[in-house]
Image (cartoon, rainbow, N blue to C red):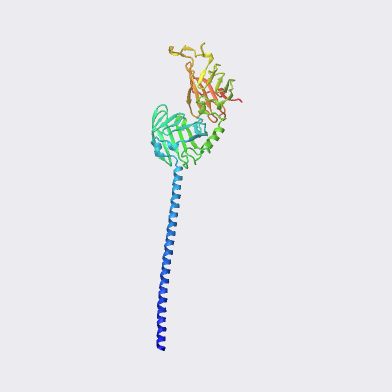
């Protein structure tokens, strides 16, 4: 009996060992399963994080590319093909350089309120028009393009007057335009520089936003506005003007009343771009028709005024008995060919001449008197 109990005990012990092993094996299996599950979850989380990071980077890249597209400036390739879409906007003349023929060479002065208009297929300055590879200033001139130091240049071919047009993107400084570049020229903005060989006259136009343009328009309302004058609008020069000869100009309501236009005491009235000289009119109010040199019969004067752009100023002229009647408007800093006078004031020259419209003694120059 003792043996039987002993064997029973041993049997129970073996069974216990086997069950314990099975239990341990089950625990090990469960632990392994939990490890795999945890690992899988972490892998999914990591993958999701990487995808999120990649997506964020892609969005940032896309945003950066979009910003770059928004900030694109002058498209040189399009410009050379005659497409000026990348130039369209508001432009203002911020500086002018001209040669006064006083031995000092070119001198910078402030902008003279000249305008430049740009459509998709044309660039129009007061004196010329560019379309494709042709510049027109009364005659058609072919343009050749070249790139240098970050800007694009368009040069006209040979002719009486040579033109050079330069396109400067943002961040590209003006090159070879003298040492004292005016502070009004802002390198952070797009600029177009137009040069003509006529007196080496140079204009700098700068692209502006509406706010800047409005401010400058307000500031320039009391200054001689050549662009308006060329259309027959004399708002910017309204008031009384006198010269040292005792002659006067009264400008109001888009009319200019002159006491002496011929130099012989004969005056007239300019309304818009039309001249009326009562002393040279017949009973019908029209210019007297008379025989001139060579037996040619023609009116004493032509009422229609012609607009002529010069180096920094504008002249309105018309024919008068073998000569020209000229009224020239010269902003501050522009001397023309006046013999003396105050260059720092706005000036008007009104005279009958067979020579240069502004080649007059200082006594003939009109200055504001009010």
Instruction: Check the image and name the residue furthest to the right.
Output: 370
Image spot of residue 165 (x, y percent): 43, 34
Q: Is residue 257 above or below residue 39?
A: above
Check the picture and name the quadrant holding the N terminus: bottom left
Count of marks overlaid on the render: 0
Image spot of residue 83 (x, y percent): 40, 35
Q: Is residue 312 above or below residue 5?
A: above
Write down the quadrant of residue 52 in the picture.
bottom left
- Nearest the viewer among 237 and 183 is 237
Check the picture and name the quadrant holding the C terminus: top right
Image spot of residue 137 (x, y percent): 42, 28
Query: Is 245 displayed left or right of 49 in the figure?
Result: right
Image spot of residue 245 (x, y percent): 58, 20
- Nearest the viewer among 221 and 97 is 221
Q: Residue at x 40, y 73 (%)?
A: 25
- Nearest the viewer among 214 and 39 is 39
Write down the quadrant of residue 135 in the picture.
top left
Instruction: Check the image and name the residue furthest to the bottom.
Output: 2
Instruction: Check the image and name the residue furthest to the front.
Output: 1
């Amino acid at each position: 009996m003792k043996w039987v109990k002993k064997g029973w005990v041993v049997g129970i012990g073996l069974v216990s060992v086997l069950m314990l092993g099975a239990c341990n094996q089950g625990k090990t299996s469960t632990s392994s399963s939990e490890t795999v599950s945890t690992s899988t979850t972490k892998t999914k989380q990591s993958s999701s994080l990487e995808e999120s990071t990649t997506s964020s980077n892609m969005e940032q890249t896309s945003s950066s590319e979009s910003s770059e597209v928004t900030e694109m400036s002058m498209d040189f390739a399009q410009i050379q093909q005659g497409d000026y879409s990348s130039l369209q906007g508001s432009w203002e003349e911020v500086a002018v350089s001209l040669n006064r023929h006083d031995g000092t060479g070119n001198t910078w002065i402030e902008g003279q309120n000249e305008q430049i208009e740009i459509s998709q297929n044309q660039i129009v300055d007061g004196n010329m028009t560019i379309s494709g590879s042709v510049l027109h200033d009364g005659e058609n001139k072919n343009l050749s393009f070249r790139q240098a130091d970050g800007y694009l240049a368009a040069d006209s071919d040979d002719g009486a007057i040579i033109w050079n047009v330069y396109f400067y993107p943002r961040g590209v400084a003006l090159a070879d335009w003298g040492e004292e570049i005016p502070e009004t020229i802002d390198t952070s903005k797009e600029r177009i520089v137009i040069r003509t060989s006529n007196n080496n006259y140079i204009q700098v136009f700068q692209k502006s936003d509406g706010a800047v343009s409005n401010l400058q328009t307000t500031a320039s309302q009391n200054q001689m506005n050549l662009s308006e004058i060329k259309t027959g609008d004399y708002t910017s020069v309204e008031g009384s003007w006198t010269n040292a000869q005792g002659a006067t100009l009264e400008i109001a309501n888009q009319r200019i009343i002159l006491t002496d236009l011929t130099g012989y005491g004969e005056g007239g009235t300019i309304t818009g771009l039309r001249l009326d000289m009562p002393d040279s009119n017949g009973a019908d109010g029209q210019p007297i028709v008379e025989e001139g040199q060579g037996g040619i019969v023609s009116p004493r004067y032509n009422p229609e005024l012609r607009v002529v752009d010069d180096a920094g100023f504008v002249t309105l002229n018309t024919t008068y008995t073998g000569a020209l009647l000229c009224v020239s408007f010269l902003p501050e800093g522009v001397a023309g060919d006046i013999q003396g006078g105050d260059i720092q004031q706005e000036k008007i020259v009104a005279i009958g001449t067979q020579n240069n419209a502004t080649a007059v003694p200082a006594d003939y120059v009109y200055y504001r008197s009010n």
